[in-house]
Amino acid sequence: MVYDDPNKNNIVNISIQYNDIKVQFSGEPENVLLSTISFLTKNIPEIRLAQKISLNYSVSELIEMYSSIIKITPEGPKILPNVGEIHNKKFSDKEIVMLFLLGSKIAFELGKISEKSSPISEIQSTTNLNPKSISSRLSELVKVGYVIKSVNKENQAESVVYGITTIGIKWLNDIMAKKLL
């Protein structure tokens, strides 16, 4: 149950019973979520094992990891161009495309845009990359499974759109970790 306290903070209460163990967590949603996950993973071995092979990113994790590079503006996701320069490493076209697609996913998850996938024209207008380079990079990324290509049927018109996959986020995390050290 979520309710507002007099201080205007959202408070969440969760009660869990597992076998003979009963616990209750109360507080801000993020803290209660972390406490709940911690309790479940410590007390239910199957969850701990499943976590070892599970790959998933919450929007809060993505924001935490990429807040210095990606900004969500009223015009949509933007990649800060000088972040790579701060670390004396320039981002490749492939990395810029992936950062944009990740920004689109984050903006969608936050309810800021209506689609998590983007057409080449939107990627080009935001990143200012050459459309042929974008097309080539997207083709490579689709082949390795880092990006998914789909057909968007909106307003009787079909357009090809691209979205980042979970394994694509993992790849991007690995690349950015090396670049931004």
Image (spheres, grey):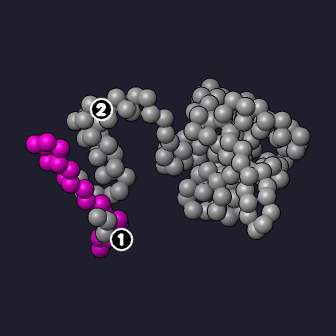
Whole-percent x and y of residue 106? 59, 51
Q: Quadrant of the N terminus?
A: bottom left
Q: Is residue 82 visible from the viewing direction of this image?
A: no
Q: Which residue is mark 1?
A: 8
Q: Which residue is mark 2?
A: 46
- Residue 41, compared with residue 157, is above or below; it is above
Could you tell me which residue is drawn at 51 percent across and 49 percent down? 59
- Residue 139, compared with residue 79, is above or below; it is above
- The amino acid type, in three-letter code, at marker 2 is Glu
Q: Regarding mark 2 in the picture, which secondary structure is present there?
A: helix
- Residue range of the region highlighted in magenta in the rendering: 4-24
Could you tell me which residue is drawn at 68 percent across and 64 percent down? 74
Sequence-earlier tag: 2 or 1: 1
Residue sitting at the far front: 156
109 is within the stretch colored magenta: no
Q: CA distance from mark 2 to mark 1?
A: 38 Å
State left or right for residue 153 relative to residue 6. Answer: right
Question: Disc 2 vs disc 1: which is toward the camera?
Answer: 2
Comparing 78 with 132, the one in front is 132
Pointer 2 local density, CA inside 10 Å: few below 14, some 14–19, many at least 20 = few
- The amino acid type, in three-letter code, at marker 1 is Lys
Q: Regarding mark 1 in the picture, which secondary structure is present there?
A: loop
Q: Is residue 146 visible from the viewing direction of this image?
A: yes
State left or right for residue 42 relative to residue 175. Answer: left
